[in-house]
C-alpha cells in the first residue's frame, strides 16, 4: 500500500506531500518534533511524548497547531491509514510560512506534519542480543539541547562519524570530560560500584521519555540508580552500559572507543530493564 502523510489539515499520498519553500523549518530549523514508538498498532508512552512536545513549543514560543485531542486523533489516524503495526509515528511542528526574516513573523500559522511507518522489530532484537559499539566525540551542539528542535546537524555529523568508525552511536562529551548523551539516545552505565547512572536533567540533554519511564521502574525493581554524570574513563571501567530511546527501548553497549565494556556482552541490568520496559507496554 502507498504511504499517507498528514500535512496541515489534509491526508495526502506520501510521495506528493509538500510544504512551502519559505516554511521556517526549512529556512531556519525553526521547529520541533517528536517520535513515538508504535507497538501492536498502539502508541507507546503517548502522554509524556505529547507533554514534551508542549514544553518544546513553549520554549520556542510556537503556538500549538491544533488542540491536544485533535493531535492525538491525527496521530492515530495516520497510523491507521499506513497500517503500522510495529513502528513509529513522527510529528513535526514549525513556526510556519513567512517571508525570510530572522525575527518571528507576526502572523505565521504553525505547520504540522505527521508521518508513520513500520520498522523491523527483529533488527532491534538482534542489536539487543549482541550489543552495539559507541564512539565518543566532543560536544558540538547548542546550549539548549533540552528542546527537541529539528536543528540536528551536529547530531547528524556525530552519527555519521560513528558509523564511519564502525559504531552504532556517538556519545557527546562536554568540556569537563563528562558524557552528556548520545546523538539520538540517552547514555547509561552501571558503574564499578554497581550503581546505574545517567546524567541529571538540564539544558545539556534532552529529557528522554524512555529515560523518564525507566527511572521509577529501576526503583521498583530494586536497582540502585543515580542521576550523576560519568566520564568516558568511568564508562570504559563500568560493569555494563546501554542506550535508550523511544523506538529502540534499551540497547546494551558492549564497546566504547574500541575498548570492551564489561565482559563484552549485554549486561544483566540492561537485559532486565529492556524486558521490563516492553512487558509493561504490551
Image: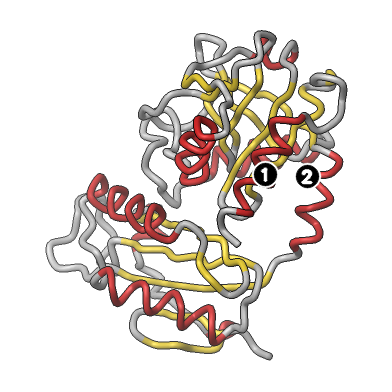
Q: Which secondary structure, mark 1? A: helix
Residue under the point 57% across and 82% down: 14
In the rendered view, tell whether residue 27 sits above or below residue 127.
below
**Residue 226, above or below 155:** above
For disc 1, the marked residue is 274
Q: Which residue is mark 2?
A: 128
Q: Under tag 2, what secondary structure? A: helix
Q: Is residue 221 above or below residue 85?
A: above
Q: Which of the 4 quarters of the picture holds residue 94?
A: bottom left
Q: Quadrant of residue 63?
A: bottom left
Q: Is residue 172 left or right of residue 94?
A: right
Q: Quadrant of residue 171?
A: top right
State the image coordinates of residue 77 (x, y, percent, origin top left). 46, 83
Q: Pointer 2: residues within 10 angstroms few (<14), some, or many (20+)?
A: many
- Comparing 273 with 181, the one in front is 273
* Quarter of the image with the C terminus in it: bottom right
Amino acid at each position: 500500500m502507498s504511504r499517507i502523510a498528514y500535512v496541515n489539515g489534509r491526508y495526502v499520498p506520501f510521495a506528493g506531500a509538500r510544504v512551502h519553500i519559505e516554511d521556517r523549518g526549512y529556512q531556519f530549523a525553526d521547529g520541533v518534533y517528536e517520535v513515538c514508538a508504535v507497538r501492536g498498532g498502539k502508541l507507546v508512552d503517548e502522554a509524556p511524548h505529547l507533554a514534551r512536545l508542549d514544553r518544546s513549543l513553549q520554549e520556542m514560543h510556537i503556538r500549538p497547531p491544533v488542540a491536544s485531542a485533535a493531535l492525538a486523533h491525527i496521530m492515530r489516524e495516520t497510523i491507521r491509514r499506513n497500517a503500522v503495526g510495529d513502528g513509529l509515528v513522527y510529528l513535526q511542528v514549525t513556526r510556519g510560512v513567512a517571508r525570510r526574516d530572522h525575527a518571528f513573523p507576526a502572523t505565521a500559522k504553525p505547520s504540522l506534519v505527521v508521518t508513520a511507518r513500520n520498522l523491523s522489530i527483529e533488527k532491534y532484537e538482534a542489536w539487543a542480543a549482541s550489543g552495539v559499539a559507541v564512539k565518543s566525540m566532543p560536544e558540538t551542539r547548542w546550549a539548549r539541547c533540552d528542546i527537541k528542535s529539528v536543528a540536528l546537524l551536529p547530531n547528524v555529523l556525530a552519527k555519521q562519524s560513528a558509523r564511519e568508525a564502525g559504531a552504532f552511536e556517538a556519545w557527546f562529551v562536554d568540556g569537563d570530560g563528562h558524557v552528556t548523551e548520545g546523538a539520538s539516545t540517552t547514555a547509561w552505565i552501571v558503574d564499578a560500584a554497581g550503581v546505574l547512572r545517567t546524567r541529571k536533567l538540564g539544558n545539556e540533554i534532552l529529557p528522554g521519555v524512555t529515560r523518564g519511564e525507566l527511572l521509577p521502574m529501576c526503583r521498583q525493581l530494586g536497582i540502585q540508580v543515580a542521576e550523576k554524570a560519568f566520564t568516558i574513563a568511568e564508562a570504559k571501567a563500568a560493569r555494563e552500559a546501554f542506550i535508550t530511546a523511544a523506538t529502540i527501548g534499551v540497547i546494551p553497549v558492549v564497546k566504547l572507543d574500541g575498548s570492551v565494556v564489561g565482559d563484552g556482552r549485554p549486561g544483566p541490568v540492561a537485559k532486565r530493564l529492556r524486558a521490563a520496559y516492553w512487558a509493561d507496554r504490551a
